[in-house]
């Protein structure tokens, strides 16, 4: 790799005296620095594109960054770019490709002893298996991720892992287990992360109670979620939560209340349309 070749050149040319070293080694070092700077720029560009939902463009930026990191032998950055490429492929529905890239990132992060990165890769792999409906595999990877996040005392990420496990149990119809993991995640969220994650978890708990047919509890948690969402000013999540409350009233046969809520959603959409 270029980085190793540079150091070999420095040692070799040192025998010829500082004048030769200064003339011959500097262009190679500049080349490496330029490649690193360009790769970092591409990574940042990809993040900006990702945030704008320009997934294909972000994918291309990260792939170009990966090529440069491979050239200069930056293993940490290589793992990060592989991770980002995996995320993009997963969102695009290319799950097998996403798994491959996350597995490659996992190998590098384990090699480097990057425990936080290892936990993140395991969580991402669990998410792909969840999307594929392979819930036993999803739980296996989520639990591995959870163990690392507890070991490294990363409370926000621990909360994420707990919520992910709860979502899988909810999909499996194991609602009691789902509620347990949601409640553990909610406690951490309130301790460390703020109202956005709290409103999401309250909504998930409401959904689980609805699945159990315990409608009064479902309404209570949906309403707590809605109160927080309104406080934050998140109009998209507000519409979704109002819709969920409307579904409860529909389940209860209170169709007039459900209709009023549907009209509120329509009004909110029209009000906030650009």
Image (cartoon, grey):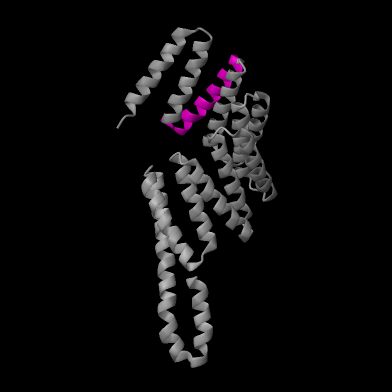
Tell me what residue is drawn at x 31 percent, y 29 percent: 273
In the rendered view, tell whether residue 130 sits above or below residue 74. above
Q: Quadrant of residue 146?
A: top right
Q: Quadrant of residue 160?
A: top right
Viewport quadrant of the C terminus: top left
In the rendered view, tell whether residue 20 sits above or below residue 147. below
Residue 68 belongs to magenta span: no
Q: Position of residue 149 (x, y in %)?
A: 65, 47
Q: Position of residue 258 (x, y in %)?
A: 45, 12
Query: Quick one: 189 or 39, which is closer to the camera?
Result: 39
Q: Position of residue 164 (x, y in %)?
A: 59, 36
Tell me what residue is drawn at x 39 percent, y 54 percent: 61
Residue 230 belongs to magenta span: yes
Q: Residue furthest left?
A: 274
Q: Residue furthest front?
A: 96
Q: Quadrant of residue 176?
A: top right
Tell me what residue is drawn at x 39 percent, y 44 percent: 55
Q: How would you classify the magenta stretch by its main secondary structure? A: helix
Tell me what residue is drawn at x 49 percent, y 20 percent: 244
In the rendered view, tell whether residue 29 sits above or below residue 134. below
Q: Position of residue 216 (x, y in %)?
A: 59, 15
Q: Say whether residue 3 is visible.
A: yes
The region drawn magenta spans 215-235
């Amino acid at each position: 790799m270029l980085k190793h070749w540079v150091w070999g050149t420095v040692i070799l040319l040192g025998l010829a005296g500082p004048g030769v070293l200064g003339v011959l080694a500097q262009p190679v070092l500049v080349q490496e620095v330029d490649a690193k700077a360009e790769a970092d720029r591409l990574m940042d560009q990809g993040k900006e594109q990702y945030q704008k939902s320009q997934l294909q463009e972000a994918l291309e930026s990260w792939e170009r960054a990966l090529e440069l990191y491979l050239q200069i032998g930056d293993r940490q950055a290589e793992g990060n770019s592989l991770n980002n490429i995996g995320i993009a492929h997963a969102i695009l529905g290319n799950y097998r490709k996403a798994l491959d890239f996350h597995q490659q990132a996992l190998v590098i992060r384990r090699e480097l002893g990057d425990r936080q990165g290892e936990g993140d890769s395991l969580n991402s792999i669990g998410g792909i298996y969840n999307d594929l409906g392979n819930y036993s595999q999803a739980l296996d990877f989520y639990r591995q991720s959870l163990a690392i996040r507890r070991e490294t005392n990363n409370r926000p990420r621990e909360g994420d892992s707990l919520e992910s496990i709860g979502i899988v149990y909810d999909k499996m119809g194991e609602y009691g287990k789902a509620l347990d993991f949601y409640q553990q995640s909610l406690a951490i969220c309130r301790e460390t992360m703020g109202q956005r994650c709290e409103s999401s978890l309250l909504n998930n708990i409401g959904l689980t109670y609805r699945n159990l047919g315990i409608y009064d509890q479902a309404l209570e948690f949906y309403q707590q979620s809605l109160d927080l969402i309104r406080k934050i000013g998140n109009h998209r999540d507000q519409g979704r939560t109002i819709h969920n409350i409307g579904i409860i009233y529909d389940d209860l046969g209170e169709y007039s209340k459900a209709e009023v809520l549907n009209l509120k959603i329509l009004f909110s959409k029209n009000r906030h349309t650009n």
